[in-house]
DNA sequence: GCCAACGTTGGC
DNA sequence: GCCAACGTTGGC
């Protein structure tokens, strides 16, 4: 099983909304690196759910429940290029783990979240995942 | 509001 | 194929 970090602006789709919905299609990814990460996801992979802009913290855990398929929100002209996955909300962290906490933690300072802040779907290591859970309760 | 990082586009 | 210009994202 692999681990990922997925980002959303809380004003666009907050983690609380995912918990309320149960599951959702993770659509709208239009970046090739992020696209390749979506394609690499397996059912059961766990995702840290990060709130960008307002928030700037990992606030919850989700899991992949359907592997990549054509993103229905992508323009028809783009064909099969853009994909989405389905994710299910698992639970909120007792304590959100902020971006500042990532930068301050030696285990997390090298993570993709810090290294390439614009990437909306990023892989994280098992160690990083465990550390976020430890910090977040 | 500004700026850094990155991706994309288009002229050559 | 290179590179300047531009657009977008996201932190500050």
Image (cartoon, coloured by chain):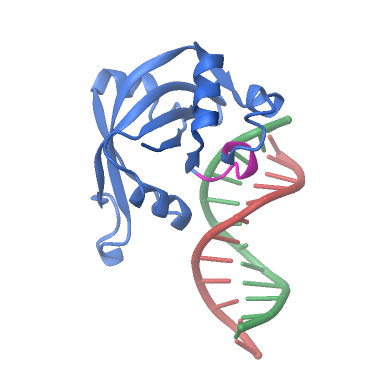
Chain colours: A blue, B red, C green
In x, y percent, where is residue A119? 52, 45
Q: Is A117 contained in the magenta span? A: yes
In x, y percent, where is residue C6? 61, 63
- Quadrant for the N terminus of chain A in the image: top left
* Residue at the image position 44 percent from the left and 37 percent from the top: A4
* Residue at the image position 28 percent from the left and 43 percent from the top: A85
Residue C4 or residue A67, whichever sits in front: A67
In x, y percent, where is residue C3? 72, 76
Residue A104 or residue C9, whichever sits in front: A104
In x, y percent, where is residue A78? 30, 64
Q: Quick check: A123 above or below A90?
A: below
Tell me the magenta residue range: A113-119
Q: Is A34 contained in the magenta span? A: no
Does C7 sit left or right of A39 as displayed?
right
Does A134 sit left or right of A67 as displayed?
right
Residue A92 or residue A77, whichever sits in front: A92
Does C11 sit left or right of A14 as displayed?
right
Residue A19 or residue A42, whichever sits in front: A42
Does A96 sit left or right of A24 as displayed?
right
* Residue at the image position 71 percent from the left and 24 percent from the top: A104
* Residue at the image position 64 percent from the left and 29 percent from the top: A107
Q: Quick check: A28 above or below A106?
A: below
How many labels were placed on the picture? 0
């Amino acid at each position: 099983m692999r681990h990922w970090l997925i980002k959303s602006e809380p004003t666009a789709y907050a983690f609380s909304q995912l918990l309320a919905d149960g599951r959702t299609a993770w659509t709208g990814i239009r970046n090739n690196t992020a696209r390749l990460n979506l394609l690499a996801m397996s059912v059961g992979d766990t995702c840290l759910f990060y709130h960008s802009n307002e928030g700037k913290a990992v606030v919850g855990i989700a899991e992949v429940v359907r592997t990549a398929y054509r993103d229905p929100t992508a323009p028809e002209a783009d064909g099969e290029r853009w994909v989405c996955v389905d994710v299910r909300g698992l639970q909120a962290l007792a304590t959100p783990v902020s971006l500042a906490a990532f930068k301050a933690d030696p285990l997390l300072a090298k993570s993709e979240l810090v290294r390439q802040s614009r990437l909306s779907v990023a892989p994280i290591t098992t160690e990083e995942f465990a550390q976020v859970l430890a910090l977040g309760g």
